[in-house]
Image: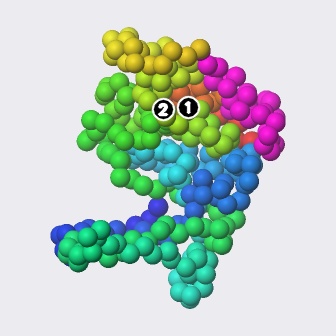
Amino acid sequence: MQMLDSFNLEGPNGAHKCLVFELLGPSVPDIIDARFPDGRLPGKLAKAIAKQALFGLDTLHQQKIGHGDLHTRNLAFAVPPMDNVPESEFINMLGKPEIGYVRRKDGKALEPGIPEYIVRPALYRGFPWSPSYPIKIVDFGESFLHTTLPKTLHTPLPVRAPEVIFKDRLDYRVDLWSMGCLLFELFVGQPPFDSFLITPPILVSQMREMASDALPKRWEVLWKSMDDRATAESPGPALQEWLEEMYFDGERNKDLTKEDILKLGQIIGRLLRFDPSTRLSAWEILDDDWFRE
């Protein structure tokens, strides 16, 4: 994502640094909601997006930058230049802005620092889009340099790396775990781990079923204290079994073969590893024959 300009905006709440970025279109989930009723991308498109995301992540990591918040909502499609599109036509593409005016319950005037109205985010149902449009990695609010490693991250819990949960040392390899979850979601239509009413203890229980290695010994004490609060559930499926079960569920379109899904499971398994040092890099994943086909 390219930054085009920056400026300071003075207001009743102080000075705000504003960054101007290139105009981007919908996120991957937005496109799925708008264009694919079964909730899943076609396999060929999912693979193209996955390759671009891996290339982008490798570029960041080569520059010693960790993204820290990698998930499908932070993959947005580029759109054709809109500089010469009249404003009225642009509004027609997105729909008329929905405005909600802010009112005090007691009817008194708003204080100076309160906005007069809020605007609902635009939908992209009428916006031009093609599967050939490239994707961009966005939202660098959690990103970090290798010289300023964060103490924690606020990646959505279902795609959060285990070292964040166990309060271990963090580095750019948190993105590799999140990439494993992202690849699963791109092809299947949902993340590998539960997203509804999920808690850290339940998530770690599911991680232990799907990760390709054992929980590190340095985390065992904290896990025992967490395990007491985890709900007692029967063991779930391993990664490959769960991937195949979700992809070949009989309810959604499937254009990948059993061999494709077997290979995809092997690739994801090389990313979903507890020990960050054993996760393959984005470039090593891209170098796999399956992504070269």
- Disc 2 residue type (three-letter): Ile
Image quadrant assignment for residue 43: top right
Q: CA distance from mark 1 to mark 2?
A: 9 Å
If the image is split into quadrants, where does the C terminus sit?
A: top right
Residue 108 in sight from this viewpoint: yes
Image quadrant assignment for residue 139: bottom left
Give coordinates of residue 33: x percent, y percent: 65, 56
Residue 124 inside the magenta-drawn segment:
no
Give coordinates of residue 221: x percent, y percent: 33, 11
Give coordinates of residue 197: x percent, y percent: 49, 34
Q: Is residue 150 above or below residue 24?
A: above
In the rendered structure, the answer to whether residue 287 lies left or right of residue 97 reads right
Residue 243 inside the magenta-drawn segment:
yes
- Disc 1 residue type (three-letter): Phe
Residue on which disc 2 sits: 198
Residue on which disc 1 sits: 193
Q: Is residue 69 above or below residue 82?
A: above
Q: Residue at x 58, y 75 (%)?
A: 94
In the rendered structure, the answer to whether residue 78 lies left or right of residue 252 reads left
Identify the mark nearer the N-term, 1 or 2: 1
Residue 273 in sight from this viewpoint: no
Give coordinates of residue 55: x percent, y percent: 55, 47
Image quadrant assignment for residue 244: top right
User: Camera-side residue: 6 or 58?
Assistant: 6
Under circle 2, the secondary element is loop
Boundaries of the magenta span: 235-264
